[in-house]
């Protein structure tokens, strides 16, 4: 029986891992193409392009990994159905091997998504912001061409008048339109990029900060010196999301030390933990539709893998728009799939044969 569990778990996991590896490579290549401006515009090499694309992979991997688990399991079950091995397993009363093998793969999937959501994704987000800040600092300090408008990140445009010895920048101009309800413009006679060893700061001297709010009100602040964080200019959204760069252990440690866990941190921990429910839900669904032998032919030519994909999209859609949280769709899928499994495993009365 243990051999059967190992055999089935290996079948389930192999297809899931192969599909995950293929999608990871394809998405990494797509991200490289999307960020190709690092080479053509910002003066960076392919190494920076490859690493920055790699840092964007954990959120994408977490989004499709549980789907790969479901498709891998259903492909393995379909192969067992075609080879009649599934019929033999049920006929010999060895179905416990299916449940144990599936449980092994589901538990492994939970471990993977928990590592991705609670640790790897925040680490990658932090590294991505640091790398983007380094690229922006290099762009401002050495790569930015005088008299040419350059986009640092979508919504942020820079322009300089010239450069002097020692890295001094003259006639600095930056326009920030990332916030939909406001617009900021930085103008300075001189500017310089400095670093404290951890963060890059843009020192603006003898200039002004102009900003327009959504109601049309205009304000202007003049300054003799203004320190602007380069990281704040390099992020896609003004202000960024600092909570996304902190792993769950840091959030829990802070809550233990202070004796208080904020609502934002609680929601973030719950959202990250809800990824495990997706793995459980899709695993139970694949067992409900594929773990039982059937001699009936499908009336529609729809691949069974497409059914798993559609159910996963529906689950994510319900979780995204539900006011109860992103785990709503997963819980519904678990309940429905569990009910179908119980119904299909419920003992039936044997049908008596009527002799002619």
Image: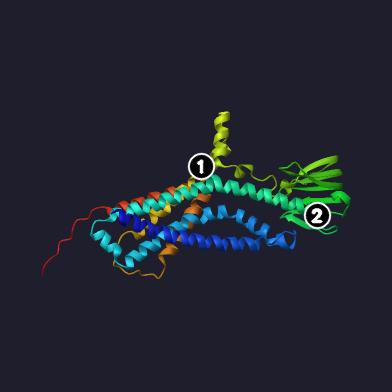
- Badge 1: few (under 14), some or many (20 or more) residues near its Cα, within 10 Å? some
Q: Secondary structure at mark 2?
A: helix
For the point 41% across and 51% down, the residue is: 106
Instruction: Kindly indicate the quadrant of the structure image that contains residue 213.
Output: top right
**Image quarter hosting the N terminus:** bottom left
Residue 127 visible to the viewer? yes
For the point 49% across and 55% down, the residue is: 65
Residue that mark 1 sits on = 270
Residue 40 numbered mark, or none: none
Horizontal side of 303 relative to 220 (left or right) equals: left
Residue 120 placed where, x, y %? 56, 48
Residue 168 visible to the viewer? no
Residue 73 placed where, x, y %? 40, 59
Q: Which of the marked residues, 1 or 2, is nearer the chain's N terminus? A: 2
Q: Secondary structure at mark 1?
A: helix
Residue that mark 2 sits on = 142
- Badge 2: few (under 14), some or many (20 or more) residues near its Cα, within 10 Å? few
In depth, the one of 142 and 60 nearer the eye is 142
Mark 1 to mark 2 CA distance (whole Å): 43 Å
Residue 124 placed where, x, y %? 60, 49
From the viewer's perspective, is residue 260 above or below residue 151?
Answer: above
In depth, the one of 256 and 332 nearer the eye is 256
Residue 255 placed where, x, y %? 56, 33
For the point 36% across and 62% down, the residue is: 77
Q: Marks 1 and 2: CB-CB under 8 Å?
A: no
For the point 44% across and 57% down, the residue is: 69
Q: Give the colouring mode of the picture.
A: rainbow
Front label number (1 vs 2) = 2
Q: How many marks?
A: 2
**Image quarter hosting the C terminus:** bottom left
């Amino acid at each position: 029986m243990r051999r059967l569990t190992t055999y089935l778990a290996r079948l389930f996991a192999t297809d899931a891992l192969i599909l995950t590896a293929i999608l990871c490579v394809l998405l990494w290549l797509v991200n490289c193409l999307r960020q190709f401006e690092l080479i053509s515009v910002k003066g960076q090499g392919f190494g920076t392009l490859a690493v920055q694309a790699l840092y964007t992979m954990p959120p994408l991997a977490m989004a499709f990994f549980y789907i790969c688990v479901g498709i891998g399991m259903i492909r393995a079950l379909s192969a067992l159905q075609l080879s009649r091995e599934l019929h033999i397993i049920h006929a010999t009363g060895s179905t416990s091997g299916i449940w144990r093998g599936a449980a092994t793969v589901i538990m492994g999937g939970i471990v993977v998504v928990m590592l991705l959501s609670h640790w790897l994704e925040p680490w990658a987000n932090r590294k991505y912001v640091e790398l983007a800040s380094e690229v922006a600092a290099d762009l401002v300090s050495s790569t930015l061409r005088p008299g040419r408008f350059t986009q640092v990140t979508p919504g942020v445009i820079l322009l300089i008048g010239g450069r002097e010895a020692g890295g001094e920048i003259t006639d600095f101009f930056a326009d920030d339109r990332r916030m939909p309800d406001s617009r900021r413009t930085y103008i300075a006679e001189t500017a310089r990029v400095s670093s404290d060893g951890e963060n890059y700061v843009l020192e603006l001297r003898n200039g002004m900060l102009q900003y327009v709010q959504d109601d049309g009100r205009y304000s202007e602040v003049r300054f003799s010196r203004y320190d602007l964080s380069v990281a704040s200019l390099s992020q896609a959204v003004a202000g960024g999301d600092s909570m996304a760069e902190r792993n769950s252990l840091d959030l829990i440690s802070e809550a233990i030390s202070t004796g208080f866990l904020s609502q934002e941190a609680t929601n973030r921990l719950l959202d990250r933990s809800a990824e495990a429910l997706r793995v459980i839900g899709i695993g139970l669904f694949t067992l409900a539709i594929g773990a039982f032998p059937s001699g009936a032919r499908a009336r529609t030519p729809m691949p069974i893998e497409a059914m798993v994909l559609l159910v996963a999209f529906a689950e994510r859609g319900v979780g995204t728009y539900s006011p109860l949280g992103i785990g709503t769709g997963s819980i519904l899928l678990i309940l429905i799939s569990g009910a179908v499994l119980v119904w299909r495993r419920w003992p039936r009365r044997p049908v008596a044969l009527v002799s002619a």
